[in-house]
Amino acid sequence: MQSALDPKEQPILASVLAIRDRLLILKEDRSTYIKSKDVIQLYDQVIEQLQCLNVVRAERKSEQNRVDAVLDDCLQLISLFYLTIGRKNEAPAVYSMTTTTKVGKLGIVFQDIANPTQRLLDHLEEAAFYLPKDLQSISHTIDAMRDTLKRGADTYSSHLLALLKSRLARCQESLSTLQRSLSGLAPNLTSVHEKLVTILRAVAAANTRQNFPITEVRDLKDQLLEIQASGQDRGFLAADRSPQRGQDVVTRLLERCLQAADLVLERQGAIDEPFRPIYDKLIFIRNQLEKLSLTQAWSLRETDLYDFQRQLDRVDEARVNGNFLDARGNSADLHAQRTLLYLLRRSYAYIYGLIISSEPVSEALLPVFNQLQTLRRCLVEVKKSGGVSSSRELYPYSMKLQSIEKMRVDGKFMFAGEIPEGQGSVNALLAECYELSYHLRTETENED
């Protein structure tokens, strides 16, 4: 519950509201590329207000009011802006990836909002089915974020770093809990468990398609019945009929899979009408994020994810004790509950994937970077297919490389008088393309 606003915090609220407005205006401006100096200037202003709030809250560390929510918005936007300008490996960029804390070490209490890593972990635990590779990916991300904070120890505000470390610790705690639950599986049950999780996810995905694939779901149920038949003889016991670690986990998961398949076949994609508005909203968000994941390199500005996160946040936080409620306050039945939770989790997974795959290259340099990536793929494919029969076949590639080379000024790519972030990545990619083209030409000349 939010506390009343202390008069001493009124100037802070006014400042962070003004900063948030400027951030939102900058986010919507598509007339030009985001400039690093604009983002850094706003970052400094946000940190100044963060420090002021810490001083005012020195004796009231557990208080929460509107200032926390607006300041959190500002930090979230700043974090996404850092990704947009290519500073993915700097501390402010970590904020959008980590969990929110109920009570931070700095006495700042932020509302739980839709931050990908923690929300993804929370929903994996709630859904109660996940694979080792899911956790390995998140573990790698947490390690990378931890390294980023270490590198920024002497550069960024101690207030920000302490907050990020607290948030990162909660991510690690949730991850460790999930890892322990899988560590109890006997080696020969791991493959069965993974197959069951894969089938359950396929059933959940089929349930949300526009045209319900009844034949596909029936085939998935047949696979479940085969697994059930293979385990009935000995109840997933070892060869000597001794109990195995995790056999109860696999048995419960199999029961859940069969129940889900029957329920989905019965409903055939139809959701209860009172929950149709929530369902339609989540379907729309999921589909939009899916499109972005397919065209990320060419169409994504990381700050676009802010609006999706906030929409998901409102849906997630409207739940009561984990249950989705309709307009009259009635809880969803099992089918609607699982369907909506799947869509929510899938949307957060897309956001997580989009952020961790963000390139450390400024938005201004991305068009060049993307062109070079495409050019490299083409040259690699030409090399795999046996090379070229004549050096003339390399002319289109050479001309493209020359056109990109002409964009450099003293070895740097300049835009609007600035040197955008990501010069090293783009120059390395350019050099690789030159090298591939040179080898292909050399091979052709040697053959001649």
Image (cartoon, helix red, strand yellow):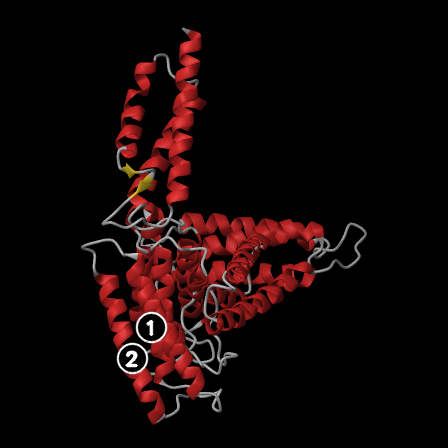
| Label 1 residue SS | helix
Q: Does 8 appear above or below 447? A: below
Specify the quadrant of the image occupied by residue 75: bottom left
- Left-right relation of 146 to 380: right
Q: Amino acid at mark 2?
A: Ser
> N-terminal of the two: label 2 or label 1?
2
Residue 124 seen in this snapshot: yes
Number of numbered discs overlaid on the protein picture: 2
In three-dimensional space, the C-alpha distance between marks 2 and 1, rounded to whole angstroms, equals: 9 Å
Q: Does 236 appear above or below 295? A: below
Residue 24, horizontal then vertical, whole percent:
25, 68
Q: Residue furthest front?
A: 410
Rendered-image quadrant of the N terminus: bottom left
Residue 165, horizontal then vertical, whole percent:
53, 69
**Mark 2 closeness class: few <14, some 14–19, many ≥20 residues within 10 Å:** some
**Mark 1 closeness class: few <14, some 14–19, many ≥20 residues within 10 Å:** some
The structure residue drawn at horizontal position 40% and vertical position 67%, both measured from the top left corner, is 340
Q: Does 54 appear above or below 344? A: below
Q: Are marks 2 and 1 in contact (CB under 8 Å)?
A: yes
- The residue nearer to you, when weighing 366 against 36, is 36
Q: Residue furthest top?
A: 448
- The residue nearer to you, when weighing 397 against 316, is 397
Rendered-image quadrant of the C terminus: top left
Residue 331, horizontal then vertical, whole percent:
41, 78
The structure residue drawn at horizontal position 59% and vertical position 52%, both measured from the top left corner, is 194
Which residue position is annotated with label 2?
15
Residue 283 seen in this snapshot: no
- Left-right relation of 198 to 10: right
Which residue position is annotated with label 1?
45
- The residue nearer to you, when weighing 308 against 143, is 143
Q: Amino acid at mark 1?
A: Gln
